[in-house]
Image (tube, grey):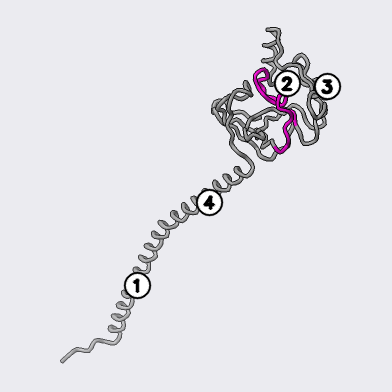
């Protein structure tokens, strides 16, 4: 004869079983959440670094595009601009810039040759050199960038810049609109507007902003 288990005892047993099942489910859920969190922690840094890399590449690409739009790199050939610039110097040239007196400009001559020269005379001006003094509209103007060279030549009894006047130009003594009188800094040995005449605004490709190389001689102009 089987003994009957009291109903209350069976009820308690069922509760224990249900509680055990629920506890097991809770533990599984908890374990799943931990695994999910670990995976999320692993994935999140990867996503973060990818986003950072994409942002950096976009920023670099945008900077390069802007640089190419507004600036260009140009090398110096020869010694026409010494002592300011030397053969092999690497320059940064701004394509669109207002041209002012004593700016260094990059030119493209009708022959296709490129060179760097310094702007001395602007439209509407007369230029005269007499005994190494620059006169703009008959007023003396200092050329501080070659003062040492002028003084050295004076000691030898010769001029650094030979006497000259824009009166010798075919266009007359006054520089026409859209034209510029340019010289090299190495006055005794350079060819410039004294021999070739004025340059036009179309021939000026940009204004030199920076010497980038040699690195130990980086300079802004």
Residue 135's spot in the image, x, y percent?
A: 80, 21
Label 3: how many Cα within 10 Å (few below 14, some 14–19, many 20+): few
Residue at image mark 4: 55
Residue at image mark 2: 143
Camera-side residue: 29 or 7?
29
Whether 47 is drawn above or below 198: the answer is below
Look at discs 1 and 2 and give the one toward the viewer.
2
Residue range of the region highlighted in magenta in the rendering: 180-202
Residue that appears at 61% across and 25% down:
85
Residue that appears at 34% across and 72% down:
25
Label 4: how many Cα within 10 Å (few below 14, some 14–19, many 20+): few
Camera-side residue: 30 or 173?
173
Which structural element holds mark 2? Answer: loop
Camera-side residue: 157 or 29?
157
Q: Sequence-wise, which precedes: disc 1 or disc 4?
A: 1
Cα gap from disc 1 to disc 4, whole angstroms: 44 Å
Label 2: how many Cα within 10 Å (few below 14, some 14–19, many 20+): few
Q: Sequence-wise, which precedes: disc 4 or disc 2?
A: 4
Whether 184 is drawn above or below 55: the answer is above
Look at discs 1 and 4 and give the one toward the viewer.
4
> Which disc is residue 139 wearing?
3
Residue 101 in view:
no
Label 1: how many Cα within 10 Å (few below 14, some 14–19, many 20+): few
Q: Quadrant of residue 24?
A: bottom left
Residue at image mark 1: 25
Determine whether label 3 and label 2 are within 8 Å by CB: no
């Amino acid at each position: 004869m089987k003994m009957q288990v009291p109903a209350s005892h069976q009820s308690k047993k069922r509760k224990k079983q249900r509680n055990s099942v629920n506890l097991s489910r809770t533990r599984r859920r908890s374990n799943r959440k931990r695994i999910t969190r670990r995976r999320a922690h692993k994935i999140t840094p990867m996503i973060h670094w990818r986003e950072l890399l994409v942002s950096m590449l976009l920023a670099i690409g945008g900077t390069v595009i802007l640089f190419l739009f507004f600036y260009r790199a140009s090398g110096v050939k020869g010694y026409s601009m010494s002592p300011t610039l030397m053969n092999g110097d690497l320059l940064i040239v701004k394509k669109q810039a207002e041209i002012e007196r004593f700016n260094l400009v990059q030119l493209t001559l009708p022959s296709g040759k490129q060179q760097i020269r310094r702007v001395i005379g602007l439209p509407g001006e007369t230029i005269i050199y007499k005994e190494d003094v620059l006169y703009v509209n008959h007023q003396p103007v200092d050329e501080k960038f070659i003062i040492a060279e002028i003084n050295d030549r004076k000691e030898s009894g010769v001029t650094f810049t030979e006497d000259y006047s824009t009166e010798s130009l075919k266009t007359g003594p006054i520089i026409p609109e859209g034209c510029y009188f340019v010289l090299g800094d190495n006055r005794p040995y350079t060819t410039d507007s004294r021999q070739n005449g004025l340059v036009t605004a179309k021939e000026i490709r940009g204004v030199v902003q920076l010497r980038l190389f040699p690195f130990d001689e980086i300079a802004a102009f």
